[in-house]
Image: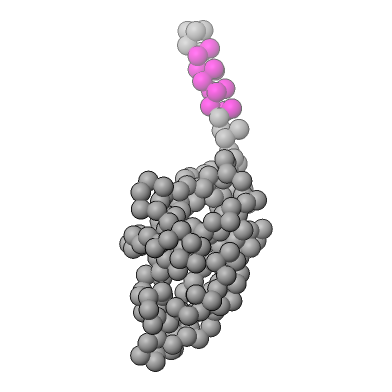
Amino acid sequence: MSTLRSRSLFLSLVLCLIVTFGFGQDYYSIHEVRVSGLPSLVSRTPDPSDVLLTSLDTILHDREICCAKDSALEDSAQRADPASLKDVAVKLQGRHLLSDGRPIQVTAQYTEADKINSGLLITTLQAKHALLMQWDSRLYVCYGATYREDFDPNSGTQTYAILTLLLLDTRYSDARREIVFDRARDDWSKVQGVLSLNFIPQ
């Protein structure tokens, strides 16, 4: 009987410790978000200007908008500095005309690296909008991410932490095309910024 009581007391103590130390801790879960249906376009040459046009064409995937001949953004995109996403945003922001004269309004949101937050990236990708990302002076299409969602039951706050970013290098059509930026391994200081684009008819 004493042995049974000892086991019961031990189990009660273990349960008490689990409740004591487990209660109030953060809970987390891992999620993934992807923008599907993007065209598999490959840049004509590795020249940064060609890579920019192809990457824009990939995220907008509307040849009337960009960047086919006589598209609304063709001239503006060609005038943009492919080494500066900020300049690309300036050139594309505003009112443009389709080949048949219909106007569209383009919203180009450039975010510098030190102002990028997990919520911005996740919200944009969840809205099915891929982004342009400049990393180590190269341009990529960011089409997805894996992230950790943390929840603090005490405060009721919910936060997000990017784990990886899923990228496309439009210079390639082979295995080099798909790149993963790993926050635990890759240097975030080499990211220059991101650019999101949207357009609506006027």
Report x, y in % for residue 115.
Answer: 65, 61
Query: Height in image: 58 above or below 190?
Result: below
Residue at position x 42%, y 66% in the image: 54
Report x, y in % for residue 86.
Answer: 61, 69
Query: Height in image: 95 above or below 90?
Result: below
Q: Is residue 49 left or right of residue 115?
A: left
Residue at position x 39%, y 63% in the image: 44
Residue at position x 57%, y 35% in the image: 22
Q: Nearer the viewer, residue 149 or 72?
A: 72
Q: Is residue 196 visible?
A: yes
Q: Quadrant of the C terminus?
A: bottom left
- Count numbered badges in the picture: 0
Residue at position x 37%, y 70% in the image: 61
Q: Overall secondary structure of the magenta stretch?
A: helix
Q: Nearer the viewer, residue 3 or 16?
A: 16
Q: Is residue 142 visible?
A: no
Report x, y in % for residue 149.
Answer: 52, 49
Q: Nearer the viewer, residue 131 or 40?
A: 40
**In the image, which residues are magenta?**
6-17
Figure quadrant of residue 38 = bottom left
Q: Is residue 40 magenta?
A: no
Query: Height in image: 65 above or below 23?
Result: below
